[in-house]
Image (cartoon, grey):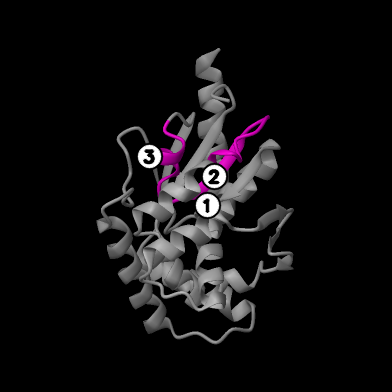
Amino acid sequence: MYNIPVIAIDGPSASGKGTIAQLVAKKLGFHYLDSGALYRLVALQSMRSGTDFTDEIMLTKIARNLDVFFKGDKIFLTGRDVSDAIREEQCGIRASEIATYPSVRIALITRQRAFRQPPGLATDGRDMGSVIFPDAILKIFLTASAEVRAQRRYNQLMEKGISANMAALLQDIQTRDARDSNRSVAPLQHGKDAKILETTDLSIAEAMNTVLQWYAEIGTNSV
Protein backbone atom coordinates (compact mmCIF):
# COMPACT_ATOMS: atom_id res chain seq x y z
CA MET A 1 0.00 0.00 0.00
CA TYR A 2 2.76 2.44 0.92
CA ASN A 3 4.19 2.47 -2.61
CA ILE A 4 0.89 3.90 -3.89
CA PRO A 5 1.36 7.69 -4.20
CA VAL A 6 -0.93 10.04 -2.31
CA ILE A 7 -1.38 13.75 -2.92
CA ALA A 8 -2.86 15.21 0.25
CA ILE A 9 -4.45 18.65 0.01
CA ASP A 10 -5.53 20.16 3.32
CA GLY A 11 -6.99 23.55 4.04
CA PRO A 12 -9.80 25.54 5.65
CA SER A 13 -13.44 25.61 4.61
CA ALA A 14 -14.21 26.91 1.08
CA SER A 15 -10.53 27.19 0.16
CA GLY A 16 -11.13 25.26 -3.05
CA LYS A 17 -9.19 22.18 -1.95
CA GLY A 18 -11.96 19.79 -3.04
CA THR A 19 -12.19 21.22 -6.53
CA ILE A 20 -8.42 21.19 -6.96
CA ALA A 21 -7.97 17.66 -5.59
CA GLN A 22 -10.72 16.34 -7.86
CA LEU A 23 -9.20 17.98 -10.95
CA VAL A 24 -5.72 16.73 -10.08
CA ALA A 25 -7.08 13.20 -9.63
CA LYS A 26 -8.76 13.36 -13.02
CA LYS A 27 -5.62 14.65 -14.75
CA LEU A 28 -3.42 11.93 -13.24
CA GLY A 29 -5.97 9.12 -13.44
CA PHE A 30 -5.90 8.82 -9.64
CA HIS A 31 -8.70 7.91 -7.26
CA TYR A 32 -10.26 10.80 -5.34
CA LEU A 33 -11.35 11.05 -1.72
CA ASP A 34 -13.40 13.93 -0.36
CA SER A 35 -12.82 13.21 3.33
CA GLY A 36 -15.20 15.98 4.34
CA ALA A 37 -18.03 14.10 2.65
CA LEU A 38 -17.71 11.34 5.26
CA TYR A 39 -18.23 13.81 8.10
CA ARG A 40 -21.12 15.38 6.22
CA LEU A 41 -22.64 11.92 5.81
CA VAL A 42 -22.43 11.35 9.56
CA ALA A 43 -24.01 14.77 10.05
CA LEU A 44 -26.82 14.06 7.59
CA GLN A 45 -27.56 10.64 9.08
CA SER A 46 -27.61 12.14 12.57
CA MET A 47 -30.08 14.83 11.49
CA ARG A 48 -32.33 12.31 9.76
CA SER A 49 -32.31 10.01 12.78
CA GLY A 50 -32.84 12.82 15.27
CA THR A 51 -29.54 12.13 17.04
CA ASP A 52 -28.37 14.87 19.38
CA PHE A 53 -25.22 16.38 17.86
CA THR A 54 -23.66 16.43 21.35
CA ASP A 55 -24.08 12.65 21.77
CA GLU A 56 -20.58 11.48 20.87
CA ILE A 57 -21.35 7.81 21.54
CA MET A 58 -24.27 7.69 19.11
CA LEU A 59 -22.44 9.79 16.50
CA THR A 60 -19.51 7.38 16.66
CA LYS A 61 -21.89 4.46 16.16
CA ILE A 62 -23.29 6.20 13.07
CA ALA A 63 -19.74 6.77 11.73
CA ARG A 64 -18.86 3.09 12.17
CA ASN A 65 -22.00 1.84 10.47
CA LEU A 66 -22.46 4.26 7.57
CA ASP A 67 -24.14 2.44 4.69
CA VAL A 68 -22.50 4.50 1.97
CA PHE A 69 -20.95 4.02 -1.43
CA PHE A 70 -19.43 6.38 -3.98
CA LYS A 71 -20.17 6.11 -7.70
CA GLY A 72 -18.46 8.72 -9.84
CA ASP A 73 -19.61 12.13 -8.61
CA LYS A 74 -22.57 10.60 -6.77
CA ILE A 75 -22.73 9.65 -3.10
CA PHE A 76 -25.34 7.20 -1.85
CA LEU A 77 -26.44 6.80 1.77
CA THR A 78 -28.64 3.76 2.53
CA GLY A 79 -29.21 3.48 -1.21
CA ARG A 80 -30.35 7.08 -1.70
CA ASP A 81 -28.48 9.75 -3.65
CA VAL A 82 -27.44 12.38 -1.10
CA SER A 83 -24.85 14.18 -3.26
CA ASP A 84 -26.71 17.51 -2.97
CA ALA A 85 -28.13 17.01 0.52
CA ILE A 86 -24.70 16.77 2.16
CA ARG A 87 -23.64 20.06 0.54
CA GLU A 88 -26.31 22.11 2.28
CA GLU A 89 -24.95 24.70 4.69
CA GLN A 90 -26.62 23.25 7.79
CA CYS A 91 -25.06 19.87 7.07
CA GLY A 92 -21.64 21.47 6.71
CA ILE A 93 -22.00 23.33 10.00
CA ARG A 94 -22.95 20.16 11.86
CA ALA A 95 -20.15 18.20 10.17
CA SER A 96 -17.61 20.71 11.46
CA GLU A 97 -19.00 20.30 14.98
CA ILE A 98 -19.03 16.49 14.77
CA ALA A 99 -15.42 16.46 13.52
CA THR A 100 -14.26 17.71 16.93
CA TYR A 101 -15.12 14.34 18.52
CA PRO A 102 -12.03 12.08 18.74
CA SER A 103 -13.97 8.81 18.60
CA VAL A 104 -15.79 9.87 15.42
CA ARG A 105 -12.49 10.69 13.73
CA ILE A 106 -11.00 7.36 14.80
CA ALA A 107 -14.05 5.52 13.46
CA LEU A 108 -13.52 7.05 10.01
CA ILE A 109 -9.75 6.54 9.70
CA THR A 110 -9.87 3.01 8.26
CA ARG A 111 -12.64 3.97 5.86
CA GLN A 112 -10.54 6.87 4.54
CA ARG A 113 -7.32 4.88 4.18
CA ALA A 114 -9.18 2.23 2.15
CA PHE A 115 -9.38 4.76 -0.72
CA ARG A 116 -5.63 4.34 -1.27
CA GLN A 117 -5.68 2.17 -4.38
CA PRO A 118 -3.49 1.95 -7.53
CA PRO A 119 -2.44 3.96 -9.42
CA GLY A 120 -2.71 6.68 -6.75
CA LEU A 121 -4.95 8.91 -4.67
CA ALA A 122 -5.63 12.64 -4.51
CA THR A 123 -7.48 13.61 -1.37
CA ASP A 124 -8.59 16.72 0.47
CA GLY A 125 -9.54 17.50 4.04
CA ARG A 126 -8.23 18.98 7.26
CA ASP A 127 -5.79 16.25 8.36
CA MET A 128 -5.02 14.20 5.25
CA GLY A 129 -1.30 14.91 5.29
CA SER A 130 -0.85 15.14 9.04
CA VAL A 131 -2.87 12.14 10.28
CA ILE A 132 -4.53 9.98 7.63
CA PHE A 133 -1.70 9.77 5.08
CA PRO A 134 1.45 11.00 6.89
CA ASP A 135 3.60 9.34 4.21
CA ALA A 136 1.90 11.18 1.32
CA ILE A 137 4.36 11.89 -1.49
CA LEU A 138 3.06 15.46 -1.76
CA LYS A 139 1.42 17.44 1.04
CA ILE A 140 -0.21 20.77 0.32
CA PHE A 141 -1.87 23.31 2.58
CA LEU A 142 -4.21 25.30 0.38
CA THR A 143 -5.72 28.52 1.67
CA ALA A 144 -7.21 31.90 0.79
CA SER A 145 -8.50 34.90 2.70
CA ALA A 146 -11.76 34.41 4.63
CA GLU A 147 -13.40 37.11 2.50
CA VAL A 148 -12.50 35.39 -0.78
CA ARG A 149 -13.63 32.02 0.57
CA ALA A 150 -16.96 33.50 1.65
CA GLN A 151 -17.43 34.98 -1.81
CA ARG A 152 -16.66 31.63 -3.44
CA ARG A 153 -19.17 29.86 -1.20
CA TYR A 154 -21.75 32.55 -1.95
CA ASN A 155 -21.25 32.10 -5.70
CA GLN A 156 -21.58 28.32 -5.40
CA LEU A 157 -24.85 28.59 -3.51
CA MET A 158 -26.30 31.17 -5.88
CA GLU A 159 -25.43 28.99 -8.87
CA LYS A 160 -27.46 26.21 -7.27
CA GLY A 161 -30.38 28.57 -6.68
CA ILE A 162 -29.84 28.60 -2.92
CA SER A 163 -30.27 31.97 -1.23
CA ALA A 164 -27.34 33.11 0.89
CA ASN A 165 -26.15 36.04 2.98
CA MET A 166 -22.54 37.15 2.57
CA ALA A 167 -22.17 38.44 6.12
CA ALA A 168 -23.52 35.19 7.56
CA LEU A 169 -21.27 33.09 5.32
CA LEU A 170 -18.19 35.06 6.34
CA GLN A 171 -19.07 34.67 10.02
CA ASP A 172 -19.61 30.94 9.55
CA ILE A 173 -16.25 30.49 7.81
CA GLN A 174 -14.43 32.41 10.53
CA THR A 175 -16.17 30.32 13.20
CA ARG A 176 -15.26 27.08 11.42
CA ASP A 177 -11.65 28.20 11.03
CA ALA A 178 -11.39 28.82 14.77
CA ARG A 179 -13.09 25.52 15.67
CA ASP A 180 -11.03 23.45 13.21
CA SER A 181 -7.75 25.07 14.26
CA ASN A 182 -8.34 24.71 18.00
CA ARG A 183 -9.87 21.24 18.29
CA SER A 184 -7.91 18.82 20.48
CA VAL A 185 -7.61 16.05 17.86
CA ALA A 186 -6.10 16.57 14.37
CA PRO A 187 -6.40 20.37 14.35
CA LEU A 188 -6.28 22.23 11.06
CA GLN A 189 -2.65 23.22 10.59
CA HIS A 190 0.04 22.92 7.98
CA GLY A 191 2.95 20.63 8.73
CA LYS A 192 6.58 21.54 8.16
CA ASP A 193 6.67 19.19 5.18
CA ALA A 194 3.60 20.70 3.50
CA LYS A 195 3.82 23.19 0.65
CA ILE A 196 1.70 26.32 1.14
CA LEU A 197 -0.53 27.23 -1.80
CA GLU A 198 -2.18 30.63 -1.40
CA THR A 199 -5.09 30.83 -3.85
CA THR A 200 -6.59 34.23 -3.05
CA ASP A 201 -5.39 35.59 -6.39
CA LEU A 202 -5.23 32.32 -8.34
CA SER A 203 -7.76 30.81 -10.72
CA ILE A 204 -8.75 27.16 -10.36
CA ALA A 205 -6.65 26.27 -13.41
CA GLU A 206 -3.60 28.07 -12.01
CA ALA A 207 -3.90 26.32 -8.65
CA MET A 208 -4.36 22.92 -10.31
CA ASN A 209 -1.34 23.45 -12.57
CA THR A 210 0.80 24.40 -9.57
CA VAL A 211 -0.08 21.13 -7.83
CA LEU A 212 0.62 19.12 -10.99
CA GLN A 213 3.96 20.89 -11.43
CA TRP A 214 4.97 20.11 -7.84
CA TYR A 215 4.04 16.47 -8.33
CA ALA A 216 6.01 16.29 -11.60
CA GLU A 217 9.04 17.78 -9.87
CA ILE A 218 8.92 15.07 -7.23
CA GLY A 219 8.94 12.43 -9.96
CA THR A 220 11.86 14.09 -11.71
CA ASN A 221 13.90 14.45 -8.53
CA SER A 222 13.31 10.82 -7.56
CA VAL A 223 14.75 9.49 -10.82
Relative image position of residue 17 (x, y in whole percent): 50, 53
Few, some or many residues within 10 Å of mark 2 (<14, 14–19, 20+): some
Q: Does residue 222 appear to the left or right of 55 in the view shown?
A: right
- Gap in angstroms between the C-alphas marked 3 and 1: 13 Å
Report if the CB atoms under discs 1 and 2 are less than 8 Å apart.
yes
Question: Does dot 2 land on a helix, a strand or a loop?
Answer: helix
Element at label 1 = helix
Identity, as a three-letter code, of the amino acid under mark 1? Ser
- Horizontal and vertical percent for residue 211? 52, 40
Report if residue 15 is visible in the image. no
Where's the N terminus, which quadrant?
top right
Q: CA distance from mark 2 to mark 3?
A: 14 Å
Above or below for 147 versus 189: below
**Is residue 164 left or right of 145 when viewed as pictured?**
right
- Please report contact status of discs 3 and 1: CB closer than 8 Å, yes or no: no
> Which residue occupies the foreground of this view, 64 or 14?
64
Q: Of the residues shown, which amino acid type is indicated by label 3?
A: Ser
Residue 112: image tag = 2
Of labels 1 and 2, earlier in sequence is: 1
Residue 51 makes an appearance in the image: yes
x, y percent for residue 207: 52, 48
Q: Reply above or below: 61 against 85.
A: above
Name the one closer to the observer, 1 or 25: 1
Residue type for callout 2: Gln
Residue 130, which numbered label?
3
Residue 132 in magenta stretch: yes
Q: Position of residue 140 (x, y in %)?
A: 43, 41
> What residue is shown at x 27% (from left), y 64% (from top)?
178
